[in-house]
Image (cartoon, grey):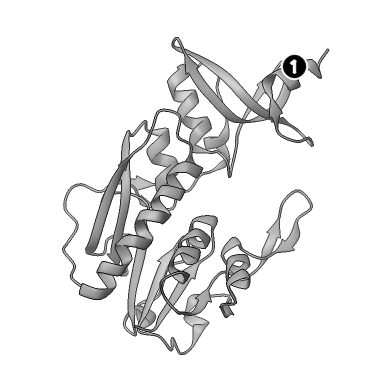
Amino acid sequence: MNLAVAATAPFGADVLRRLAKRHDIAYLLTRPDQPRGRGRQVGAPPAKEAAGELGIEVRQPERPAELGDLDVDAVVVAGYGALIPKELLDRALWLNVHPSLLPRWRGAAPVERAIMAGDTETGVSIIRLVEELDAGPVGAAGDFPIGPDDDAGVVFERAADMGSELLDGVLALQEFTPQEGEATYAEKIGPGDRELDWSRPAQELHNRIRALSPHIGARGELHGRPVIVWRSRIVDGRLEILEVQPEGRRRMTLAEFERGLR
């Protein structure tokens, strides 16, 4: 089967790398280059960087509808970041690697919202894309546990591994069943989601920190200084901060940060 991949985010880049080991990828469909980082320098999406490493053609239309001829039988979507219009959905088999057990956590941030909610299990669903957000029928699904200290990076990596393996069976059989159960929605992470309120329960704070690590970062104030908190743990019911990043500086252990205050 002639195959393309639509991906932008690091999760999509990981899926692309795994698929390229077992399939010939005709091209990558990704979002245009955007300003990134503190200096706001224009940079390539992570999936484009992966495609460059793999020698895969890259297509970057402003909108998916501008893609033109698909030139493939199927497109695998993973962390692409834009809705696919109906006129494209009708011209090929579009499969989405969604890192949750649908219909739980449809939407933009399924991994982050699952960890914030304290879920102890998640998984991957391979669905055929339809116009409604993440509502398509399921071709395959698999589950795995979320450990008490697993962060989003760990969950995304497991999801990429499982999703790329499940895809082979879905591409071969192309059999789908409707989603069952009540849908929940994973809203995009906003500025307010990043703020740490130290008056909240320790487990809630720990869940927020690991949900936003290592890619977004939870923000709080320690010893009167604003920091990003990257790692924590629960010890005897209390929150213990392990790694922080003061404004304009590198990541460091809490002990290093506190030594710098003396």
Closer to the camera, 6 or 87?
6
Residue 116 x %, y %: 42, 34
Tell me the residue at 33%/49% (across/down): 100
Q: Name the side, left or right, on which 222 lies relative to 187.
A: right
Residue 54 x %, y %: 58, 72
Tell me the residue at 83%/12% (across/down): 262
- Amino acid at the residue labelled 1: Glu
Closer to the camera, 92 or 191?
92
Tell me the residue at 41%/67% (across/down): 77
Check the image and report above or below for 217 versus 57. Answer: above
Q: Is mark 1 on a helix, strand or loop?
A: helix
Residue 23 x %, y %: 41, 75
Q: Residue at label 1?
A: 258
Toward the front, the furthest residue is 21
Q: Does any portion of residue 102 appear in the rendered image?
A: no
Closer to the camera, 110 or 190?
110
Report the number of numbered marks: 1
Choose top left, top right, bottom left or bottom right for residue 232: top right
